[in-house]
Image: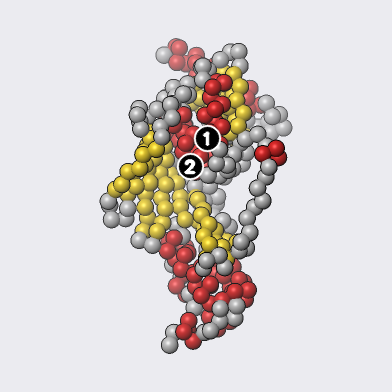
Amino acid sequence: MNAIEKSSQRGVPLYHAFWRIVKDTYIDVARLVDWDSWEHRFDESISSDESAYPFIDLMLSSLGDTYTERLAPGLAAPEASPQSLPQAVQALLRTDGVAYLRIGTFDRDDIADEVSASLEKIADCSAVVLDLRRNGGGKVDQVLKCLPLFIENGLLTTIEVRHEGGIKKREYFVNDQQFFMVETTPDGSQVKEFYNRPKPVLAGKFLVLNMDARTASGGEMMLASLAQNAAPGKVKIVGQGKTPGKGIGQVEYDVLDGRSRLKITRSRWLTPGGEWVGDCGQTRSDGIEPDILVTDYEDVNACFRASLKAIREMCALLAAA
């Protein structure tokens, strides 16, 4: 009779459900070398869901991943009213033809729609300053929907997602006519999914990307994709510090029909060039360095002035070529 059969304690199956999800889906398998040793470690000490929680938390903490955690069951963040939400997208066109576009977050389902609508104000620009400072990321689908507005052809990003059978690789591309994803399964088979392809309104423009030490995750994904897909000599990164290198993504699970919840690091993303920016220093933190470092952190306009200078220099170099 195994440990589960011997126990009538209600919390044991809950503990084991957490253990199983991590075993099957946690992205960094190197951290699971000793994971089997946790499976039945506390079976005789658990007598209820509540008594299982400290053991679940201890087990999860052994991963050394601050993003993987047990969440309180049934609780969700309160929805803010539209009036209380900060303006996430701002756009304006200067008289000299330089556009300023700020995307403050990707953590809303309407961000890509807001960006698309804002392009009506700046579509005729000759250059764009895209401000991603303090953009800590959010919903990856919103990042992916924004990128084709700037990129005409190319690989946008690669996302690796772990399943019980192994790693699925999802590569997102745009070309002149299409926006599509190629998914490669562990056995090598491939499937394609096609999405609505927005017009690349800002493709080919001079582009300056603003970032800082709080530009993370989806913000970093956008930075890397735009920088690596831009035409040579037409892009610069101006920043107040290096990004943290959050190249990992999390999902949330309801465990055992909502008896508890788990947030787990299940994916990682790669730049178009195939680089991984890290996991915020848990095992590695490469991050993204600016081409032009702005050290005046008190002046909110310092990055924009440096961006205008970078645009003038890029224009001059291309004119002289």
**Is residue 61 visible to the viewer in this orientation of the structure?**
no
Packing grade of label 2 (10 A; few <14, some 14-19, many >=20) is some
Q: Residue at 32% x, 55% y: name it.
A: 186
x, y percent for residue 189: 27, 51
* Quadrant position of residue 228: top left
User: In this rendering, is residue 69 above or below 277?
Assistant: below
Whether residues under marks 1 and 2 lie with C-beta atoms below 8 angstroms apart, the answer is yes
Q: Which residue is mark 1?
A: 112
Q: Amino acid at mark 2?
A: Asp
Q: Which residue is mark 2?
A: 141
Left or right: residue 50 compared with residue 208: right
Q: Please rate how many residues cluster around mark 1, counting C-alpha atoms within 10 Å: few if below 14, some from 14 to 19, many from 20.
A: many
Residue 231 makes an appearance in the image? yes
Which residue is at 42% across, 40% downward? 157
Residue 113, given in percent of the width and then of the height, sits at 53, 33
Q: CA distance from mark 1 to mark 2?
A: 9 Å
Q: In what element is the residue under mark 2? A: helix
The label shown at residue 26 is: none
Which residue lies at the image location 28% right of the left edge and 56% below the top edge?
A: 187
Q: Earlier in the sequence, mark 1 or mark 2?
A: 1
In the displayed structure, would residue 196 be above or below residue 139?
above
Number of marks in the rendered image:
2
Mark 1 falls on what kind of element? helix
Counting from the top left corner in percent of width and height, residue 286 is at 51, 45
Query: Along the line of sight, which residue is nearer the eye, 132 or 179?
Result: 179
Question: Relative to the observer, which residue lies in front, 258 or 233?
Answer: 258
Q: Which quadrant does the N terminus fall into?
A: bottom left
User: Which amino acid does the dot numbered 1 rest on?
Assistant: Ala
Q: Position of residue 146 (x, y in %)?
A: 49, 34
Q: Is residue 316 left or right of residue 105?
A: left
Residue that appears at 46% across and 84% down: 5
The quarter of the picture where the C terminus appears is: top left
